[in-house]
Amino acid sequence: MINNRSLLIVGGLAAVAWLASNSLYVVDETERAVKLRFGEVIEENIQPGLHFKVPITQTIRKFDTRVLTLDTDTSRYLTLEQKAVIVDSYVKWQVVNPTRYYESTAGDEMMAIRLIQPRVDESLRNEFGRLDLQQIIAERRDDLMIGPTQDLDALLREELGVAIRDVRVKRIDLPDDVSAAVFERMRSEREREAREWRAQGQEEAERIRANADRRRQVLLAQATERSETLRGEGDAEAAAIFADAYSQDQEFFAFWRSLNAYRESFQGDGNMLVLDPSSDFFRYLKSAVPSGE
């Protein structure tokens, strides 16, 4: 009796344990789940936590809802002018509708990638096809990918239940034949810009030089005018002084002027003058007493 009772208890505990393990399940914080009954979804978007299901008839499918990265294959696209570019890109995607994701991919991540990649390739092909090579080179890559990201996000949310968080271009290469043409165009444009800057610089230099010359002429004219004015005033003042001195003592003034004339005439070596001894030039050399006294 005791052994039978023990077996019943052990069997009951085992049944409870089996029932608990097959009835209770946990959804992690990084996951979302759907509940299925014979393959049909009966509960959508189950949130993280502890949940209950009916054993055998109900099953649970969990999906990673973290942002995942898809490195796309390097592809060759044609620009608006039919020039080839080689593009290496990647995609950030995330499951946002578990039910739709399960119905479209059966919860298989590899199948999801196989469905996402051709749509990304088509979107990038269309985006590069509407731009010429110069626009692709000149535009920022972040701005270049805004349109494809928005279009893919709207499309794949509806088709696969996934959100496209970002599409980024890692590298854009040019074939050798295209690279030569692009570099030549870039060189021509830089040379044109350099010529424009030089022309603007020369124009500015001429303007500054002309302004400086004009100011120089104005300053010289003002200085000349001022110097002539001062010279005239000085000559007038000197004449007035001479006139005043002459009026005070005419004979002394004549004597002083004669002394200056002697000094100027005989200041060099070998100076010689041929004059009549009775000339008025020797007036003050012949007599110390002025005439008329």
Image (cartoon, rainbow, N blue to C red):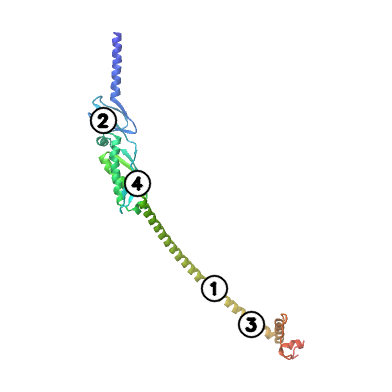
- Residue 180 seen: yes
The amino acid marked with disc number 3 is: Ala
Is 246 left or right of 45, judged from the image as shown?
right
> Mark 1 against mark 3, which lies toward the viewer?
1
The amino acid marked with disc number 1 is: Leu
Give residue 35's mark.
2
Instruction: Give the crowd class for mark 2: few <14, some 14-19, many >=20 residues within 10 Å.
Output: many
The amino acid marked with disc number 2 is: Lys
The amino acid marked with disc number 4 is: Val
**Relative depth, front residue between 184 and 136:** 184
> Mark 2 against mark 4, which lies toward the viewer?
4
Residue contact at pointers 2 and 4, CB within 8 angstroms? no
Question: Label 2 to label 4, Cα distance in Å?
Answer: 41 Å
Q: Which residue is mark 4?
A: 87
Instruction: Give the crowd class for mark 4: few <14, some 14-19, many >=20 residues within 10 Å.
Output: many
> Mark 2 against mark 3, which lies toward the viewer?
2
Q: Is residue 85 above or below residue 271?
A: above
Q: Is residue 38 above or below residue 219?
A: above
Q: Which residue is mark 1?
A: 220
Disc 1 is placed on an element classified as helix
Q: Which residue is mark 3?
A: 239
